[in-house]
Image (cartoon, rainbow, N blue to C red):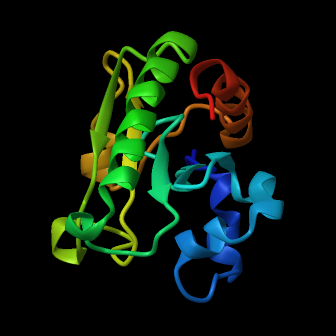
Amino acid sequence: MKDILYAPWRSEYVSGKHVEGCVFCHISSHEADDGDLHVLYRDEHCFMVMNKYPYTPGHFMIIPHLHTDKLEELPSETWLHVSDLAQKSVRLLKEGFKAHGVNIGMNLGESGGAGIAEHIHLHIVPRWHKDTNFITSIANTRVYSTDFEKIYQRIKELIPTYIKK
């Protein structure tokens, strides 16, 4: 019997639809498309968007509107706002989404491991006891145990309770 891995949220990736330029700037400037782009929240400083290639269900990012690859040049007001949203996001994931823990991180620059190095972004990754397994290291594959759209809708429903403008 042949095993089949199904990842429907990746169909756009393999269909050839690609954004010209910075994908984060595209999301930042297309507020009318927030639902299609899986934006969870936006304000004058930044936006929160689901990660299209998540480590775990509920993985999203906080991204400043300002296009920069240099955290050290981000205005302090924007960085403090990102930090405030990160703190609220942790509470949202722990209390509302029932995550057991959360990883927070930034990969700065291509050498630092950033997949999109030209625009800084902060990863917010919910974690659960024993949510890791061998398949990632042995088969270079991630297992996503639930529907991406359902997770997006669930977190979006939690935003007004935990994150206020």
Which residue is painted at 24% across and 76% down in the image?
110
Quadrant containing the C terminus is top right
Which residue is painted at 35% across and 40% down in the image?
83
Which residue is painted at 27% across and 38% down in the image?
134
Q: Position of residue 109 (x, y in %)?
A: 23, 73
Front-most of residues 4 and 53: 53
Can I make out residue 125 in this image? Answer: no
Q: Taking 65 as reference, is 134 above or below it?
A: above
Left or right position of 52 against 71 = right
Q: Taking 15 as reference, is 21 above or below it?
A: below
Examine the image and state in which quarter residue 80 appears.
top left
Front-most of residues 12 and 45: 45
Can I make out residue 131 in this image? Answer: yes
Q: Residue lying furthest right in this view?
A: 32
Front-most of residues 118 and 5: 118
Q: Taking 35 as reference, is 92 above or below it?
A: above
Number of numbered discs visible in the structure rendering? 0
Q: Residue lying furthest left in this view?
A: 111
Which residue is painted at 63% across and 61% down in the image?
10
Quadrant containing the N terminus is top right
Q: Taking 133 as reference, is 43 above or below it?
A: below
